[in-house]
Image: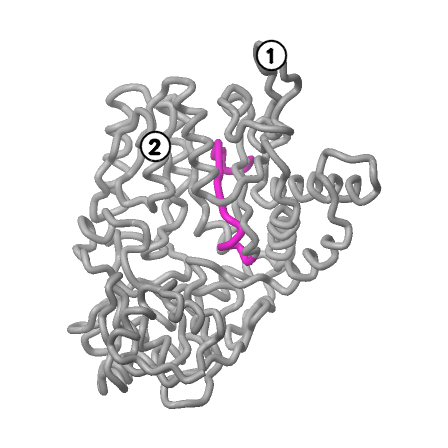
Amino acid sequence: MTPVVPVVPSRPLLPVVGADLPLPVLGGGTRRHVHLDLAATAPALRAVADAVTAALPWSGSVHRGAGLPSQVATARYEEARREIGTFVGAREDDVVVVVRNTTDALNLLASAVAARGGEVVVVDVEHHANLLPWRTGAHRLVPAATTVQETIARIAAELALRPAALLAVTGASNVTGEVLPLERLTALAHAHGARIAVDAAQLAPHRRISLAASGVDYVAFSGHKLYAPFGAGALVGRRDWLDAAPPHLAGGGAVVEVRSDGTDWAAAPQRHEGGTPNLVGAVALAAACRTLAALPEGALEAHERALHARLLTGLEALPGVAVHRLFDDADDAIGVVAFTVDGLAPGLVSAVLAAEHAISVRDGRFCAHIALERVLRRPEGAVRASLGACSSLADVEALLAAVERLVTEGPAGEYVRCDDGTWAPARDDRTLPEPLVAGATAGGSPCTAAAVDAARVLTV
């Protein structure tokens, strides 16, 4: 086992493209971009960008072509598939299907379950990617309790009620970062004759996963949250259901033979990868997997724990700031924190952080409406800050200082509520990037258009 190296959270663990990007702020000048919205989309690792740059000159038709570039492209694509499987500890007979993202992966798996006529058990606080696909078929919704223990008890009761084909769970909440005990849930599902699928969109960038060691049957994750934002993700898991499922995307490459009276479909993974594969996306995702896997054992977790602890203690010390959790007894979490500020709409908080401090966070209900409304009782949403391998202590301190200033002094200028519910400065004197200016002129951005209607001034 590789020894754990001392972690210094004052600097990022891994370099990314766009680090220290200068952004314009209200009042003139620029500030270093503080990227704390990694749970939505993470920047590309430098190693990912380098891998893509190396692959582009050899672009060719994957699986189709006698030319050398085509052969190189095919080899790179299949090697990427192997590396993606290795990253999640795939078993020898598991299948790695390269898809667009976690949502795509779980929709594919939902079609496989539906083809078997089985039911899916799912908890109601899931991200919509792990909730809506199951609603297309037979499913049972388990209301989450205020504790992990009671929630697991409710899942157990539902599984015991009548047979289910699959238990679908999220590895780590995209709202609060809380991590569920996957090995315990896996044992529970298997004890009741069900398989388990894990939405690892948030877990995979932060913790190591092993299908072989844990017994998890299927895992789905996205490249754009794993520092490979090029439109690729993966579904990895047991072959039999995927071989029997209807083709996810009917087309060339997914077939063995096409006749006038029918089609012989290929086995997985080709069965579900119709059309020209996303070579760049697969190469990028594999490079991200390879880079994260090369970190010393425990280094990423230790790095994030130090930053997460400082962020939590700093926010909880500020008057009027509340940190939110789904479960009272959760003892593990990735670097994701949801909070609110008394008297200020979450959208206003995030707008102030962006416009005045060049800090990117997320606000709203995070594609987890039931979690925000029923469990957290925040129908208006919350603010979410998310950390990762590219985060540093300076990022956390910048956020804490900005929130403290907002709490004690309020916004520096006037903000307006846009037609789409977002917020923007009433008068924006920043030098905005050209796409934003063009979008305002063409009416392409609802928020910008609303701000223009409120006598917003663009300096370009």
Residue at the (61%, 27%) spot, across then down:
254
Rate crowding at label 1 as few (under 14), some (14 to 19) or many (20 or more) other CA atoms within 10 Å: few
The correct choice, above or below, for 307 with respect to 400 in the image is: above
Above or below, comparing residue 402 to residue 360 in the picture: below
| 372 over 448 or under it: above or below | above
Is residue 225 located in the magenta-colored stretch of the structure? yes
**How far is the residue under mark 2 from the one under mark 1?**
34 Å
Residue 389, percent from left and from top: 53, 64
- Nearest to N terminus: mark 2 or mark 1: 2
Q: What span is colored magenta in the figure?
A: 212-227
Q: Position of residue 377 (x, y in %)?
A: 16, 55
Percent of width and height locating residue 307: 43, 70
Instruction: Please name the residue that numbered disc 1 is placed on.
Output: 260
* Image quadrant containing the C terminus: bottom left
Q: Secondary structure at mark 2?
A: helix
Q: Is residue 201 left or right of residue 72?
A: left
Q: Amino acid at mark 1?
A: Ser
Q: Where does label 2 land, which residue? A: 134
